[in-house]
């Protein structure tokens, strides 16, 4: 089975489902405390500087990035979501583009190149490296690269449709509602999981798994702290900070594991 092609087909199909549209078009500021900490970390240095925002979807990150600078370019490879963003922000430079090939963008230009909400996890590992190399290329010397990624040691790894089973509670009306919700959601989740679990793979430092989001309609990469640090170093990026999603705290460089759902990486391109 061609895992690379399968991940592309599965995940791009998922981004156009009703559940994904509802999630991506909901008014939401931060995905988690870690993202809020990361943006605060980036804000002063990137103020008024050129910014590249990858995987913008329907435009959640646009107001957050525009607080730093109006010198802004946003890209996404899912046309229906990008059209939503263009309707909301008609005067911005928003482009249909795949992060694996951003050759239309200049070398050494952006003070910050960002790919938020674990978007980099939705391609296979070879393409993940292509994306990071493209992010490196378009970032100017001394500039910053920011992205988030699912943690293989976190509670999200190994999710299964059984977690949709209703939790017991003393309120019969509430429990009945939970049962009805499970009856409605479980068939779709089981069908998606059965199909997508065929793509499960385990490697040293990372794994491929179906994730619970959108009723197990997506298949993503889960990586480890040491592996992600290693990959960034191999590309030439210097890790400045790693921030856990749950508490927004910076993880000490000596720490080798984390129980965060996902990890926010801030790295610098050397001058």
Image: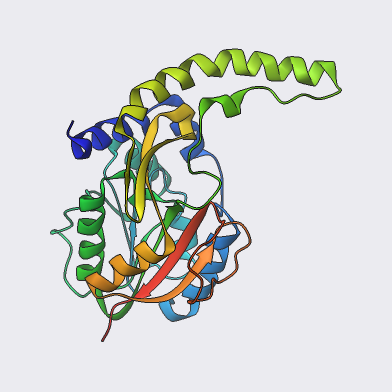
* Residue located 53% across and 75% down the image: 252
* Residue located 66% across and 13% down the image: 180
Q: In the displayed image of the protein, which residue is found farthest to the left? A: 103
Name the quadrant containing residue 184.
Answer: top right
Please state if 35 lies on the left or on the right of 146 as rendered: right
Foreground pick, 232 / 152: 152
Name the quadrant containing residue 167.
Answer: top right
Q: Quadrant of the N terminus?
A: top left
Residue 40 in view (yes/no): yes
- Residue 234 location, x and y as percent? 24, 71
Q: Is residue 197 above or below residue 54?
A: above
- Residue 183 location, x and y as percent? 60, 12
Count of number-bearing discs: 0
Foreground pick, 101 / 187: 187
- Residue 7 location, x and y as percent? 27, 36
Q: In the displayed image of the protein, which residue is found farthest to the bottom? A: 271
Q: In the displayed image of the protein, which residue is found farthest to the right? A: 170
- Residue 202 location, x and y as percent? 33, 44
Q: Is residue 38 above or below residue 128?
A: below
């Amino acid at each position: 089975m061609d895992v690379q092609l399968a991940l592309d087909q599965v995940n791009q199909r998922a981004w156009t489902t009703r559940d994904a549209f509802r999630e991506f078009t909901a008014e939401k500021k931060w995905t988690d405390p870690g993202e809020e900490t990361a943006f605060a970390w980036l804000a002063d240095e990137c103020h008024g500087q050129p910014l590249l925002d990858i995987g913008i979807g329907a435009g959640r990150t646009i107001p957050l990035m525009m607080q730093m600078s109006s010198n802004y370019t946003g890209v996404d490879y899912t046309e229906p979501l990008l059209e939503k963003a263009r309707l909301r922000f008609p005067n911005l430079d928003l482009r249909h583009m795949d992060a694996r090939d951003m050759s239309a963008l200049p070398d050494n230009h952006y003070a910050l190149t960002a790919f938020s909400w674990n978007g980099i996890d939705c391609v296979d590992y070879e393409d993940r490296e292509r994306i990071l190399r493209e992010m490196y290329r378009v970032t100017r010397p001394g500039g910053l690269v920011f992205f988030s990624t699912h943690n293989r040691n976190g509670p999200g790894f190994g999710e299964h449709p059984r977690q949709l089973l209703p939790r017991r509670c003393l309120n019969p009306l509430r429990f009945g509602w939970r049962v009805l919700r499970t009856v409605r959601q479980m068939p779709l989740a089981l069908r998606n999981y059965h199909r997508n679990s065929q793509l499960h793979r385990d490697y040293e430092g990372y794994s491929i798994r179906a994730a619970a989001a959108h009723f197990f309609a997506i298949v993503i990469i889960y990586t480890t702290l040491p592996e992600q640090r290693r990959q960034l170093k191999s590309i030439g990026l210097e890790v400045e900070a790693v921030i856990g999603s749950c508490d927004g705290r910076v993880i000490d460089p000596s720490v080798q594991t984390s129980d965060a759902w996902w990890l926010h990486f801030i790295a610098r391109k050397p001058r």
